[in-house]
Image (tube, rainbow, N blue to C red):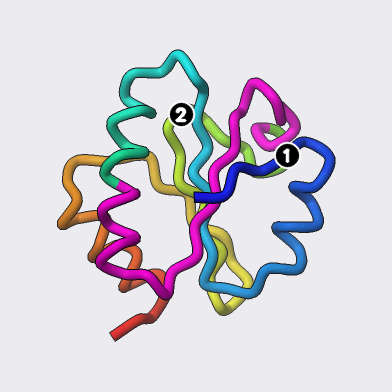
Amino acid sequence: MLEWKPEAWKREWTFTSAPYAVFVHTPLCGTCQAAKRMLAVATEVVPEFRLASANLNEIPELAQTFKIQSVPCLLIKRKDGNIYKHYRFPSVVELVELLKNEGEIA
């Protein structure tokens, strides 16, 4: 999972084609660490879904730009140009289904 740098995140978001997701987290968030592990497994099952991560402490403007309410948050850039925000990380199975559905992957 590629970690976004503060100086390059806008370029990454703008020029990476959908489906694309960014896992927004903070380093001291225990739920974020568990969600990151689940996402690592989910992206092994759905490798065609590109995923990056972003530390909200290093890139605070993400919270304002995307109106992020809490962490962990999965920002999904859909093929139609819309953005979906996902805050629940209950299981790997649910994350796999989410990535497949949001990415329109069979």
Secondary structure state at the residue bearing disc 1: loop
Q: Is 24 displayed left or right of 15 in the figure? A: left
Q: Is residue 16 above or below residue 68?
A: below
Q: How many marks?
A: 2
Which of label 1 and label 2 is nearer to you? 1
User: Residue 31 placed where, x, y %?
Assistant: 32, 25
Instruction: Look at mark 1 in the image and give the residue it sits on.
Output: 5
Magenta region: 39-63
Q: Residues within 10 Å of mark 2 (few under 14, many from 20)?
A: many
Q: Is residue 59 above or below residue 53?
A: above
Quarter of the image for residue 13 reads bottom right
Q: Nearer the viewer, residue 75 or 64?
A: 75
Instruction: Look at mark 2 in the image and give the residue it sits on.
Output: 71
On whether residue 60 falls in the magenta region, the answer is yes
Residue located 58% across and 73% down the image: 18
Residue located 54% across and 43% down the image: 53
Q: Quadrant of the C terminus?
A: bottom left
Q: Residue furthest bottom?
A: 106
Looking at the picture, which amino acid does disc 1 mark?
Lys
Quarter of the image for residue 57 reads top right
User: Residue 51 placed where, x, y %?
Assistant: 49, 57
